[in-house]
Amino acid sequence: MDGEDSESDHEYDSENTEGSESEDVVVEDIDSFDISEAEELLMKDLSVVADDKNEGEDADKQEIKAIPRKSRLMEELEKIYVETCFPTYLDICWEFADTEMFLVDGSNLLKLIRFEVKNFIQEYGSNSLQWIFLAEKFLASFQDRGGIFSLVFFSNCGVTPEEKIFATHFKMNTDINVVTEFTDPYDERFEDYVKKFRPSFFLTDLDDFIECIHYLSIGLNIADLFDMTRTVVERRAWYQSSVRFSDRVRQLARKIAKCRTSQSSWVPQQTVPEANTLLFHAYAHLKIQEVCGDEECTAQFYIQMLANIINENFTILQRSKMFPHLFKINSQKFKCKRIVTESFTANLHFCQPAQLPQIIDEQLYYNLVYFFQESGSLDIQHIIQDGSLQSNINDIVLNFQEQKKVCEKYLKSLPRITPDSSKIRKVEINETFYITSHPLHKAFPKNVIEILDEHCLETAEKNLNLRYKKFQELHHWHNLQLLSNEYERIPDNQSDGRSGQKYARFMEKYGTSLEGRTLSGDPIVVQENTDRKQKSNKKSGGALKILLDKLSQDFRSEAENFKKKVAAKLTPREDLLKELKKNIEKRLRDLYALKENVSPKSKQQLDQVIRIEREITEFDKNSVHPLLAKVLSAKFKEWKTDKTDDKKIAFLLVVKEYEKVIKELPTDTLDDVAGYVSKLGFQDLSKFLMKEDHSECSTFLRYQLERMGKHIVKTPPETRDPRIGNFNPDLWQRDIFDAIDARESALIIAPTSSGKTYAAYYAMESVLKESDDGVIVYVSPTKALVNQVSATVCARYSHRKKMPPGRSVYGTFTRDYRYYTMNCQILVTVPECLEILMLTPNHFGWVKKMRYVIFDEIHNIGGESRGECWEHLLSMIRCPMIALSATVQNPEVLLSWLQNLENYKRKMDADLNLEIRKSYTVRLIPKTGKIERHSDLKKYNYFEEDLKPIHPISYLNVEDFLRKGEFPECMTFSPDECLSLIEELTDKFGKKETKCIQPETLFQVKFLDRDNIAELNRGIKTFLQSLQPTKENHENLQSVISKFPGFTQTEDSDLMSLGSQTFMLQRFPKLVKRLRESNMLPVLVFVFDRSLCEKLTIVQKRSYLKEILEMKDSAEYRLKKQKEDKIKKAEKKVIRKVMNKTPSDPDSHGGKSEPAIEEDKLFDIYEYQRDFPNQTLMSQTNTTSQEDIFFILNRLVGSCQFSFVNLFKFGMSYHNAGNNAKMKSSTEMLFRERLVNLVVSTTTLAQGIHMPCKTVVFAGDSVFLNSLNYHQCSGRAGRRGFDTEGNVVFYGIKESKISRLMNSNLPLIFGNSPSSTSLVLKLYSLTSPSLPEADRKDTLLRAYGCLNNSLLSSRIKSLGPQLETFFLYASNFLQEQEFIDHEGHLIGFSGLASHLAHHEPFNFAFCHILQEGVLHSLISRNEKGEIEEDSLEALMTVVSFLFYRTKVNNIQPNRILPPLPDKVCSSLQNFNEMLNIHYRRYINSIARLIVQEEVKITTPLSKLGYMCPKSGAIEPLTHQAGVRDFCDLENLKLTSSINQALMTDTLPGFDIEEEVNGFALSFYKSGDRESMTMDFKIRPGDVYACLNEINLVLKSIETSLKEIGPTDEEENLIEAFTELSSQFSEKFNKAFNVTKRSRKSWGNYKIHEKNCRVCEIIEETDTVESRDRKFKVRGVVDCKSQGCIVLLKCGTCRKSCVFACKQTVSVSIDSLPSQQWSKCLEEHKVKLTITEKLKKVNDRTLEYGRVSWADKLKATSLK
């Protein structure tokens, strides 16, 4: 099974590694290894040979050599680490997106930065300001995303000068929390720090597995600092969640760490008050004297001192003029410089903080030496013009006259140094942009074009290499065909035949299950204009009189019936009271509706209305009052008999419901009711009902909070909305309806199940009524949600509006299929598919029909992937939109951007003289505050085999909260939690201080509603946030928190010893039993590993089966079954007598349908519920009809394994992306019908799917269990209309993770990559010059909107001109690569590049090597003319390298993708070099736009300013460090002067040398899916997605090449990709049991190539011939068909026979009764034809079919 654990087959390498001694220990059992022996060996094996180091070398070169050798013990530990950990490569910004704190390893951060600039350091020397600036930029990028972090320096690591400067700078010059009190990672204080502050992860070096073992063991998640992809919107890195290692492994890791850890320790100190330059240098000189007092050290100290003084007194701009030379660094010339640097950094607390970043500047050091050697003197007064500066410098220099003399002597003996003139060269700026005649090219980057010089611009017709034309000539691809668009490649499921009817029936059933009833409503008729609408609604006088008379008559009839029911005393009084109230409200509502049509002049009708109203109210008063008094009296008597809270609450709920009526009761009756209430203990409520003063006590308020929380509901508006007939909408819902009526846009932020989706249906109905042509589009994030919304729309509107022939009310469009996409009024789709329609010129007419677009789950605009697609759609649509979400943290930011979009559209519509919309306003709903859930969520932790309740406050991190002063926004309290917290706060802080949060202060005595509870929550949060961070408040608040259940700071012992997955599998049946006992079903169990979905349900099923088997073995059960069997036998005898008919009519006998034969027990879903109700989770009160059950399960026949269907008998199922659509929909429908009460699911059910449940369980930890998924999934709990509260259970999750989730806020919406070369290509396609002028104007408007309004550029204003320049760059790239011509027409392989746009930059690289003819050169044929397997493997290697590249981590070298063929590698290198040239042009152009002659550079975090000279495209501080030119692509990105805001990730380039996971090639060779996880370290849940992506890429390439390639001749490349795609697809389908059932016509089919006896002899035909006639085969049949009639013909014996198959044909052919025919099958030439597949199968129909076909075909009939 996919993802199951298995033992590793890796054998320990017995050969000694290089340099290892014979006494190396091979650790067979790590737990039995002796630690003292390990310590002795490690001291020997892990020591670094000091002789290998050169003392004069820089630290960077020493670090390279100082690599310890691995002992066998270390190899074994590494093996354990690799086999235990499966890191995931993800965007770590999502880990702190909810403003959680994380840690950054400061020492490793310095190593990373210095590693990135190592080429510069080795050539130009080190410059501390450069790498400090880069480090600050790195950290600032996290702050820009809302990251809160602490910088951790372990004191035994801060021993190099660079680390000392680094740590001291961040501690003194920035606001970052710098933590330096820990000696090393193993310091117990560090472990306490992790437990106390609970950081989300530690950004460090994952290659150091020894330390990683320790971090993970103390519960600290880790992320890799080094192998990180940094783009403008993402920070992707390897991420590993905490795991537990054995104590022995941890002890050994600690020993290894101690053996290799430096014993020295250093902690940065705060700057002393008397710090100055003189003291700093004096203490540095003393330090040098202690270490080494020779002349060379003294001389170099003096030079360094002068360099420090110059850095302190002159700007970079001044220094660049004073010392303009550039030197090639040679560390051998100044061997003591390292000692000098260490001496200076030993006393950094005497240095001025602002000077810390400039202490190391080797270029300045060399310039000083050169200057002194040239001038022959150490006096620099003639360089310094400022007299005051001369005086200051002389004052310092005079204190070091002796050192000056030593230095002069030393410099005279030193060989002269000379500047490296070859390195001093000006950056060449020879950029040229080709300008096309396309309007988009001229209009969008207009501002940039005006600034650029004329020589930078050139007509696109010049200087273009026509590579594609050469390719055509070489490979004969002359007939260039127009490539089909993505829409045309998706299968069209539109059908009016039988399949269409089946689909429509399913959608109706599915929709009914979603709504819970059969939907009905008035027919929807198009209303041509408003006047006619108003006229048609106006009733005439005669009609109005008839309606009023009927209303009066109906009311009197109901009144009489009610009196009879009261007299009969058969119906409970409470039910009668509710019925009466409901009927009276309905009649009054109908009366008021008619009253609006009454003319003020018609006195007769007015009098009639008044009379009817008086009649209804009088009856109400005379009937309700006495009945209510009796009901209350009865409820009180019940309480007196059984004085429990349940009876008391039942009484109070009646009082609450009829509160207004009670106050109007007669005095005597009211006194009685008040007396009842007083005796219940609520004198304050009694006085409230009597309208007396009740301010002295508040018993009732507190009782409601403590005991009646689940009965506190939202108060509906008093008046109903006439637009909505079937329910009373909330006020915020009415705001939505107002916005839709005004054709405005709206952003709606409301919790799950609050009713926000109803806005979509209101908008749909509005568009349906408007016309037959208008289109409303519903955009869903997932295909599952598309299916659900489509079914709901079908159920709501298909029967209410009659559409013209060929059109449908609704349609769907996903990447798998489309249904009436272009011919519907309501299109339900996913964002990628709507983007296809918006960017395809062919669908311009359809786009113009759009009236509204509804974006469901709009928070996906800030998702890890596909967010840019949502942005493009919002920018391009020309109609109003509605955006829905429950989880947006910063709606005001999103609203501002959406409103700016609409303002831009209004301006462009006016400028281009297009139709002006009715409104361009975007409403935020709600305008203020937030909409609360309709029910509370109770939290539990499954701890030590019990459900432990959690009070959310118990997980509050007090120290972190008081320090920040920000209470977690998403932490809310239920009424009883509010009360208990208030009481504890009052006890600790005093009643006076907490008066503001007391219920009596906030509310008068009344029945509370949800708004009151929200107000109470706000009051508690306000009070807590007002607490000052004092020690007393800290202790008091900590004491309060400790009183509540929840965070125990101790983990479940079983969870820690077994591990999360084993714990969950073993304890799951006990959890389910506990949930059932607590009445917490139905339940959704969310897991984040697809393989666990099925495993958990199997564990539960086996547990129930074991119990069932034990019960079946009991004597009681056997006796019961014997009695049942006797009764059944008697019934059968009676039935046989009644059903005894002749066998000539097979249809007269009902038999089981074909599906029941295929799986005999398929439809017996109640098999276990009847006899073993406690061993199934199926609801006992289920009322689902057998017809509905049959319909649901019948669809699954042939679509899934029987094991999946069998789970339904136990009332459970599982749901994930690996299930096909039929499996998912069946699970959803049965869950809603309560036949299934437990579903284990991945996040496929998290977004919008209507699966209301009482409880949500989070099973197991995962990196994907973040704040967003937590809030999305937990929102499913608490069914509106079913449950008064929901439950959330944490199962198999550590308390540290629960704490993070409870304290987390929702992630902020930041933005996405604003542009890409593929997007520019698609926009050129959209705005094709061949479009009609009117259409082109609209498409240009869409393109401008997409380019000008990215969400990210609204936050980073400097992106505007850079986006314009990038557009020029991308256009120029597309022209030179021949994807567009000089007019903007698409040419060459542009279509292929567009189809593969999701894989940029590899789509362009693939087109490049295709156009170069490299792929053709890989193809060769064998002697038979077939494509050789080596050629296919070479192509597969190329595809694996370019598409869906998976990073390598902890896999064996032989699992890495083999090297690319030489020709491919060479071509890709040329591609990258070409990109480098283009990108230089890009960088230089932007530098020309924004870089000034003199620029002030401010460090991002420390805010230190430095005046720098103009440096072109080189970043000024990097330019000062010595860099004068770009070296390569990566360094170009690193050293760009504008890379802080530049979208360097939009560059279509990549690293050819990067190691790539070879999983795709391996799967192509073997078809083994199991190895994907075990060998290639791909998560089990990701295996399907990874391989499916490769499968789709191959199909896309195959289809594209067939369409654009030659069609009249054999083409090697097309044939090769066809074969490659076919083989890969076949292996993929086989590995994942994907059965693509094509719609075949009736006939016989062969489905096996070998190893099948039937397929070897079957004739693939659709007719059967006798001697003189032909008969049509009935049905689609093959060797697996059941219930068939079969014809056998022996060509040798020349005879034939007919027999019937009740089982499959394969089984029947092996059990033929005739020995003669068995012999013929073995020895003769026999042909087999299946003549018919019977519709009804039983013994009679089989016999009739066999006899009749034998007679028709003149063949022998075999019984």
Image: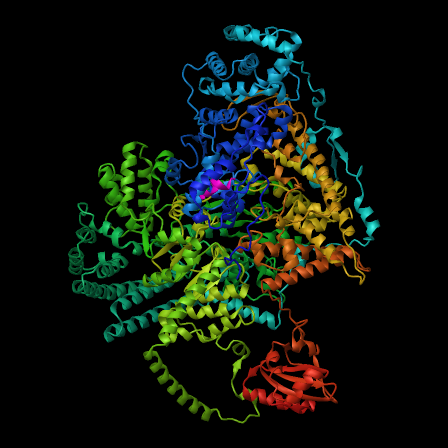
What kind of secondary structure does the magenta stretch mostly adopt? helix
Rendering colour mode: rainbow
Q: Position of residue 785 (x, y in %)?
A: 51, 58
Task: State left or right for residue 1243 relative to residue 1612.
Answer: left
Query: Is 395 placed above or below 60 here?
Result: above
Q: How many marks?
A: 0
Residue 403 within the segment the image draws in magenta: no
Q: Position of residue 1714 (x, y in %)?
A: 63, 89
- Identity of the residue furthest to the front in this view: 22
Q: Quadrant of the C terminus?
A: bottom right
Task: Using the rendered view, name the quadrant where residue 441 is placed.
Answer: top right
Task: State left or right for residue 1203 relative to residue 683.
Answer: right
Q: Is residue 78 visible?
A: yes
Q: Is residue 1250 visible?
A: no
Front residue (pair 730, 474)? 474
Front residue (pair 1089, 20)? 20
Q: Position of residue 1637 (x, y in %)?
A: 62, 68
Task: Using the rendered view, name the quadrant where residue 1111 is placed.
Answer: bottom left
Front residue (pair 1377, 555)? 1377
Magenta-tinted stretch: 208-216
Q: Position of residue 1332 (x, y in %)?
A: 72, 49
Query: Is 56 placed above or below 586 here?
Result: above
Front residue (pair 975, 430)? 430
Residue 211 within the segment the image draws in magenta: yes
Query: Is 1743 placed above or below 1661 here?
Result: below
